[in-house]
């Protein structure tokens, strides 16, 4: 999806939008890509989850003392179907480069809002 589809967000003053995409046709709840939309330049950067992984929504954490809207980190939960284990992934918000991954040691509902669908994890 092109960034022009998010023109309403740009008109509201936001420059960047982080959105999840689902690239699987058989599971509408397993998001497998994170897209960083620059609404002013109408460009997008995308990262894909490794095979067998699902991603949760990204939360932006600003760098202390920095003014830029993308200067900081993205924190994102994920699930690895092969390990049956969740993780917290940290990425640089500007470049989307990988910074760190912390394994939870268990599986729990994916997402900061506690959404859960057993079928999403069985099909991975």
Image: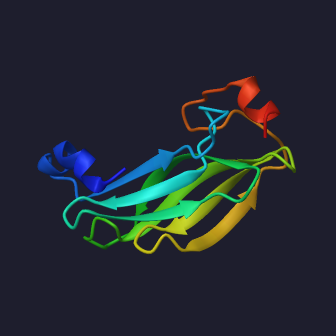
Identify which residue, 51 or 112, lies in the foreground.
Answer: 51
Residue at the left extreme?
Answer: 11
Position above or below: 60 against 109: below
Q: Give above or below for 91 relative to 112.
A: below
Percent coordinates x, y for residue 66 in the rendering: 30, 73
| Left or right: where 124 falls relative to 56 | right
Residue 123 in the image, given as x and y percentages of width and height: 79, 34
Identify which residue is drawn at 54% across, 63% down: 47
At which x and y percent is residue 27? Answer: 66, 33
Q: Quadrant of residue 89?
A: bottom right
Image point (61%, 29%), residue name = 114
Looking at the image, can residue 63 be seen?
Answer: no
Compared with 60, 123 (above or below) is above
Residue 108 visible in the snapshot: yes
- The structure's colour scheme is rainbow
Position of residue 100 relative to residue 36, above or below, is below
Q: Image quadrant for the C terminus?
A: top right
């Amino acid at each position: 999806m092109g960034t022009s589809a998010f023109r309403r967000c740009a008109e509201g003053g936001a420059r960047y939008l982080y959105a999840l995409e689902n690239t699987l046709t058989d599971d509408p709840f397993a998001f497998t890509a994170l897209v960083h939309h620059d609404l002013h330049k109408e460009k997008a950067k995308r990262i894909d989850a490794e095979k067998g992984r699902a991603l949760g929504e990204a939360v932006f954490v600003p760098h202390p003392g920095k003014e830029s809207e993308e200067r900081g980190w993205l924190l994102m939960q994920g699930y690895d179907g092969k390990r049956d284990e969740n993780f917290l992934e940290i990425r640089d918000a500007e470049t989307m480069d990988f910074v760190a991954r912390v394994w939870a040691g268990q599986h729990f509902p994916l997402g900061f809002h506690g959404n859960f669908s057993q079928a999403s994890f069985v099909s991975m």
